[in-house]
Image: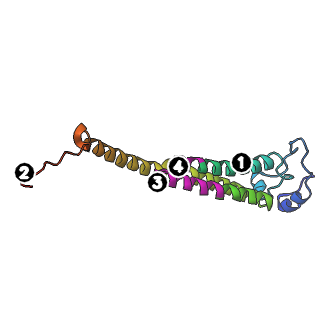
Amino acid sequence: MRYPRSCAIAARRHRPPATVGGSAGIVTLAPWEYLFLPFNSRDFPDLFWPISLASLAIVVAQVVLYNVLTRRYRRYEPLVTMQEWMLWTGVISFSLVIVGAVFVFYFVFVLAFIGVGTGVYLWARFFRWPPLIAAYNEDLHRSRFFSQAKYKHPEATIRSRRRRRRGR
């Protein structure tokens, strides 16, 4: 049953349900009209469960990575701070995708959550933090070099004996 463009809402209401095998059958809407359909398993049978489960897996993996890496890098403040950025970016973005799936948001919002979250994640990891980590590494190398130069002579750490004064 084909409807004119002006009856797109009626077409959405009366479209045949998707088949169970994952094939949606005949595409009856223009690609941009799918953006304003609710994100559920009926309207997006090929995308709903993979996106929802991948979002849940990313949130869990982000929490596990944060716990492991902050223990490993606890002495290096910029690396711990970067891991906090990664944690909160991943948890907020992909939790919003899960919320969008549970509360049946329009698909355009789910795409926006994924796009903005992934963009912020990549920006923070590859553009924001590398210069700060490089500066921290340079300071760390400089301080190690000066401490090595200070104690380079083998007797630098040995206290010299105080000589007794003859007058006592």
Q: Where is mark 1, residue-wise?
A: 57
Q: Give the label on residue 166, or none.
A: 2
Start-end of magenta stretch: 68-91
* Residue plotted at (56% across, 55% down): 84
Answer left or right for 35 relative to 10: left
Q: On the image, which quarter does residue 38 sit in?
A: bottom right
Q: Position of residue 94 (x, y in %)?
A: 68, 54
Res 133 visible: yes
Mark 1 and mark 2: span between their CA atoms?
79 Å
- Most distant residue in the left direction: 167
Res 153 visible: no
Asked whether the beta carbons under mark 2 and mark 3 sit within 8 Å of each other, the answer is: no
Quick one: label 2 or label 3, which is nearer the N terminus? 3
- Mark 2 residue type: Arg
Q: Where is mark 3, residue-wise?
A: 77
- Toward the viewer: 132 or 140? 140
Asked whether the beta carbons under mark 4 and mark 2 sit within 8 Å of each other, the answer is: no
Quick one: label 3 or label 1, which is nearer the N terminus? 1
- Mark 4 residue type: Arg
* Residue plotted at (69% across, 50% down): 60
Q: Where is mark 4, residue-wise?
A: 125
- Most distant residue in the front direction: 168
Quick one: label 1 or label 2, which is nearer the N terminus? 1
